[in-house]
Amino acid sequence: MAFTLATWNINSVRLRAGLVGRLLQEEAPDILCLQECKSPVDKIPLDAFAALGYPHMIARGQKGYNGVAILSRLPIREVGAQDFATLGHARHVAGELENGVVIHNFYVPAGGDVPDPEANEKFAQKLTYLTEMRDWFHADRPGRAILVGDLNIAPREDDVWSHKTMQRIVSHTPVEVEHLAQAQDAGAWVDITRQDIPEGQLYSWWSYRARDWDAADKGRRLDHVWATPDIANAGHSSRILRTARGWEKPSDHAPVFASFDL
């Protein structure tokens, strides 16, 4: 089975249903994983996506915030969802394809603005969330699995516009990078994007606050595609659709793609 997968923090699936439709029509991934859907599951416009050839959806939703969904051309069955850090948030859902590959769609907490778990409860929750991800992967080592989503951490120096500046900013602080690395190592996850594009600055998020995000180019690679070692060599053709950040009324994230021949 060969398929192309995309992951995208859409920042409201109902507000940006037209952009989702545009991506499905123009880029035609077989599977699209969305984060920050900001919608109850029954309010996600599945009929519109089904009309474009994506009749399958598994999702977890909430009114107004969080939320994850997997849209698929291919049959997919839900195999669970985790509530790490016991936040009661819709931040994870997993589905299994007919070939046995499990796809995990994650939306890791952003962590607020202050990188101090004692002064900032949201930052503490983020670290706890990542710790529990790590422990889960240790306890139940994944195989034939792909993990995607907005992990809200840019781990490498070339995943941010300025390593020196960003070390003090939530999403690239040393403690976050270390927590993410521990979760990644626990599942032996391979970073497919960087397997395909090993060198150079690479971003998937640009702030709404930038007057001209494209010219300033102060980006971060917050969105990721990982795979377990048993299928990592089947991953290829990774790319980030930067142009989507410039679409009308866009998300502040751009979709990240990878293909797999399994």
Image (cartoon, rainbow, N blue to C red):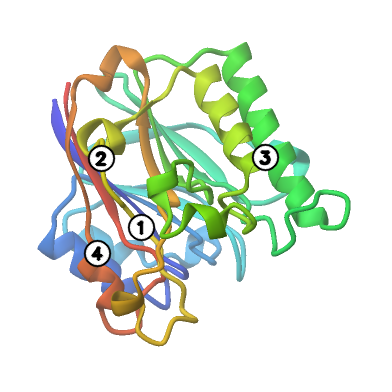
Q: Earlier in the sequence, mark 2 or mark 1?
A: 2
The residue carrying mark 2 is 199
CB under 8 Å between discs 2 and 4: no
Measured from the top left, where is residue 243 in percent x and y? 21, 69
**Residue at (27, 21) in percent of width and height:** 232
Question: Furthest residue to the front?
Answer: 164
Measured from the top left, where is residue 129 in percent x and y? 68, 39
Measured from the top left, where is residue 105 in percent x and y? 45, 41
Q: Nearer the viewer, residue 99 or 239?
A: 239
The residue carrying mark 1 is 204
The residue carrying mark 4 is 242
State whether residue 7 is above or below residue 253: above
Q: CA distance from mark 2 to mark 3?
A: 23 Å
Quarter of the image where one finds residue 24: bottom left
SS state under label 2 = loop
Q: Earlier in the sequence, mark 2 or mark 3?
A: 3
The residue carrying mark 3 is 175
SS state under label 3 = helix
**Residue at (79, 52) in percent of width and height:** 116
CB under 8 Å between discs 3 and 4: no
Q: Residues within 10 Å of mark 3 (few under 14, many from 20)?
A: some
Q: Nearer the viewer, residue 158 or 142?
A: 158
> Identity of the amino acid at label 3?
Val
Q: Nearer the viewer, mark 2 or mark 4?
A: 2
